[in-house]
Amino acid sequence: MVYSEISQLKQKPALWENIFVIFVLFLATGAIIPLIRKENGMLFDPVQGDMVIQGLWFGIYIITFFLLLVRWRQAAYMAYQDKLIWLLVGLALVSVLWSGAPALTLRRSIALLGSSAFGIYLVIRFTWQELLMLAAWALGLCAVLSFVFIVLLPSYGIHHDIQHNGAWRGIYVHKNALGRYMSLAAITWLLYTFNNISGRIVGLVFYSMSIVLLFLSISKTSIILFVLLLFPLLIYLYRLGRRRYVLSVIIITLGITCSAIFLTSPGQQETSVPAQLPEVDLTLTGRTALWHASWDMVQRRPWLGYGYSAFWLGYEEPSGHIWRDLHWEAPNAHNGYLDLWLQLGLVGLIFFIASIIVGMFKILVLICKRKGHFEVFSIFFILSLFINNISESLILVQNCIFWILYVAISAKITIGYRER
C-alpha cells in the first residue's frame, strides 16, 4: 500500500485528537511542572525522575499505542520509510547490554520508543498543513502561558539569581529554554501566517509575542539562530510575491528588537530588566572545559558509548570524573553530538549525522519541485536542531518536542520525496 492510498483512506482527525496532540507537544517542551517543582525546592533524583511527568507520559504512550494499533498497517509502512531513525532507537534499546545502569537505560529507551511512535502517529493522522498548525498552536500556548507567568507570577517567570537576574524564562526552568522554543515558535507562526489568509492577524500577534519573549529571554544562541534563519525565510516569502506581509514582519521585528535593546540597556536596569546584554564569554559559560572533559571520557569508550541515558547519573557513575574535575554538576555535555557519542558511541553519531544529511537532501529536492510551506518549515527546523545542539543537548531525547517533530518530519519528507 503506497502513501497516496493510505491518505485516501484516512478520516479527518477528530477535535479531541487535535487537542491531544497540542497538549502532548506542549508537554514535550518541558513546561511548567519542572519550573514549579524547582522553585518550591522539590528537586527529584536524576535517576528516578519526576513521578508526575512519568505518569503523564505513561498515559500518552498507552493512548498512542491504541491509536496506532487500529492503524497498524499504516504505522508499519510509515516507520519503514526512515530506517536510520529506527536504527538509532534500536541501538538505544540494545545498549542496555553494555549500560552501567541497565534498568534506567531500558526505561528511558522505551520512553524514546514511545516518543518516536507518537511522531509516527502524527504522520499517519495529519496532513503537512495540519501538522504545521498543531505545532504553531502548541508553541503559541507556551508563549501565552509564559506571558501569564511573567506578568502575574514574576517570581516564577523571571530569573532572580545572580547570574541571570532579570532575564525572562516564562514557564521554563531556564531562560535558554524559553529562547529556544520562542525562536522555533516565531518561525512556525510566520509560516502559518503566510499559509492561512484568514488567520494572518492572529498569526502576526503570536509571531510578535514569540519574538518579544525571545529577545527578553536574553538567550544569545537563540537570538542569533533566529536572525540567521529569519532573513533567508523573508527572502523566500518575498519571492513568492508576499511583499506587503514581508514588510510588516520586518517592521514588527525591528520594532521589538529596538524595544528589547532599550529595555536591557544599563539606563533601564532599575525599572525593567536589570541586566544588560552580557559580554561575550570566550569559554561559552564554561562549556569549553566541559567539552574537553567529555571528549576525554568519549575516548575511553568510543564505539558504543556508555549506554543510552547512562552517563550523567552522579558522582559514582562515569559523570563523576567530570564533576569532580570541573566542580560543576553538569546535567549533560551541553553539546548534543558529544552527548550522543557518550551514550551510543561513534555508531550512534554516524546514524544521526547520516539521517540529517539524507533528510536535508530530500527537503532541498522537494523545495525545488514544489516550494511548499511545510518543506520550508522542515529545513528551518532541521537547521535549528543542528545549530542548537552545538551548545545544548537535544538529540535522541525522550519526551522532547524536537525529537518527536524530527521523527514526524523525517518520515513525511521521505514519503514526499519517494512520491515525487
Image: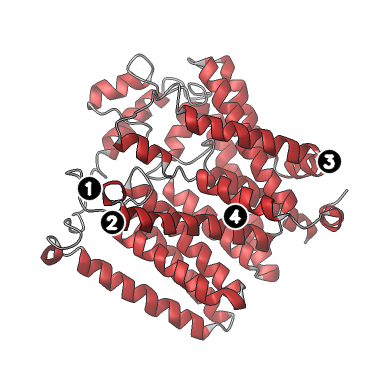
Which of discs 4 and 3 lies nearer the camera? The answer is 3
Circle 2: residue type = Ile
Q: Nearer the viewer, residue 289 or 8?
A: 8
**How far separated are the C-alphas under marks 1 and 2?**
9 Å
**How far separated are the C-alphas under marks 1 and 4?**
36 Å
Give me the residue at 35% from left, 42% from top.
173
Which of pointers 1 and 4 lies earlier in the amino acid sequence? 1
Residue at far front of view: 152
Q: Is residue 358 visible?
A: no
**How far separated are the C-alphas under marks 4 and 3?**
27 Å
Mark 1 touches mark 3? (CB < 8 Å): no
Q: How many marks?
A: 4
Which of pointers 3 and 2 lies earlier in the amino acid sequence? 3
Mark 1 touches mark 2? (CB < 8 Å): yes
Q: Look at mark 1 in the image and give the residue it sits on.
A: 164
Give me the residue at 79% from left, 39% from top.
76
Q: Look at mark 4 in the image and give the residue it sits on.
A: 360
Which of pointers 1 and 2 lies earlier in the amino acid sequence? 1
Which of pointers 1 and 3 lies earlier in the amino acid sequence? 3
Q: Look at mark 3 in the image and give the residue it sits on.
A: 73
**How far separated are the C-alphas under marks 1 and 3?**
50 Å
Circle 3: residue type = Arg
Give me the residue at 64% from left, 66% from top.
367
The image shows residue 383 at horizontal and vertical percentages of 50, 55
The image shows residue 245 at horizontal and vertical percentages of 50, 81
Which of discs 2 and 4 lies nearer the camera? The answer is 2
User: What number is the disc on residue 218?
Assistant: 2
Circle 1: residue type = His
The image shows residue 62 at horizontal and vertical percentages of 67, 33
Q: Nearer the viewer, residue 279 or 182?
A: 182
**How far separated are the C-alphas under marks 2 and 4?**
30 Å
Give me the residue at 54% from left, 35% from top.
398
